[in-house]
Amino acid sequence: MLALALSLAACADRPARTETKDAARADSASTDTSALGVARRQLGPEVRQAIPYTVSDYTGRFIAAAIPVHEWVQDPLRNGVSVAPGGHEIVILEMPDTSTTFAFTKPGLYVTDLPGTPRSGPNASAMPDSSALRHLTGVQDMNGDGDAEVWSVQYGGPRHPYTWEIRAYDRGGRDLYQLAARRRRGGTGLDPASWDPSRNLAEQPAIRAWLEQKLQALETQFASADAGQAGAASSPAGAATPPAGAAAADSSAADSAPAGSGR
């Protein structure tokens, strides 16, 4: 009888221990001050990458967070073109020193596909793994002015002759820069005649030079990949037009088309 009583007492204690462990995990998550921990609290647990950075003349905290795209998202910079499920959107979190809450901006930065990365379906973008994702988005002060730019890369496959597109967002001036280039026909390397910059890059030669070098490096790094694996359904710069009957998700954001952007 004594053994039975002890066994019943132990069983009765198990839920309490489980609740204690769950509470400890919740407390740990709520006190995680890393960029990834903060981003996941503000944007959800699906955030796959979070990079903290600073902007001159701003004392607040900035985080560039990569979130998977699960539905068709209208690309705010290209009318009628949507980003396919499987890509990532880069959301920028900003918290002023005097505030305990974050504001967020969706400037129109997306990551889609990578040469040789298989798609999950004919109407989906390839989902880069965590190691690949760091090659396709990041933060860099491209012109040395103290304002770090957040950049992201999209890649398009066979139906849009292997086009790379890179975008960079400058939070200080709220400017969005774009640069696209195609692979040489029948070979590797970027075609010098294919460079297609946004108009505002004419005022930022250092930023354009950095973007060109990044695309050249990516093309060199992934030139040997089987780009055909990306799928014949690939579209311009990794984006696609939704299949018939599919509604593109609304990617509304107050800063989706910052001043100074556009071709």
Image (tube, rainbow, N blue to C red):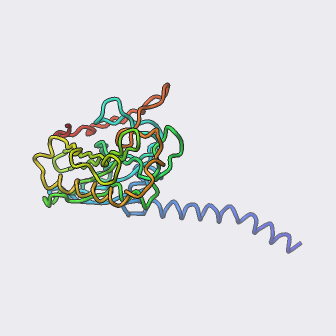
Residue at the image position 31 percent from the left and 57 percent from the top: 138
The residue nearer to you, when weighing 101 against 144, is 144
* Count of number-bearing discs: 0
Q: Residue furthest right?
A: 1
In the rendered view, does 175 fall on the left or right side of 228?
A: left
Please provide percent x and percent y for residue 228: 46, 47
Q: Going by the picture, which residue comes out furthest to the front?
A: 186
| Quadrant of the rendering where the N terminus is positioned | bottom right
For residue 122, side relative to residue 40 (left or right): right
- At 43% from the left and 40% from the top, the residue drawn is 234
> Depth check: 94 or 169 in front?
169
Give x and y (percent) for residue 109: 31, 45
Quarter residue 196 falls in: top left
Outermost residue to the top: 245
Q: Is residue 149 above or below residue 231?
A: below
Above or below residue 89? Residue 145 is: below
- Check the image and name the residue furthest to the bottom: 2
Which residue sits at x=22%, y=46%?
195
Which residue is rendered at x = 34% and y = 36% of the image? 75
User: Quick check: 198 left or right of 251?
Assistant: left
User: Could you tell me residue 66's position as x and y percent?
Assistant: 39, 52
Between 129 and 119, which is closer to the camera in this rendering? 119
Which quadrant, please, contains the C terminus?
A: top left
Q: Give how far across and how far down residue 238 sits, in percent.
A: 38, 43
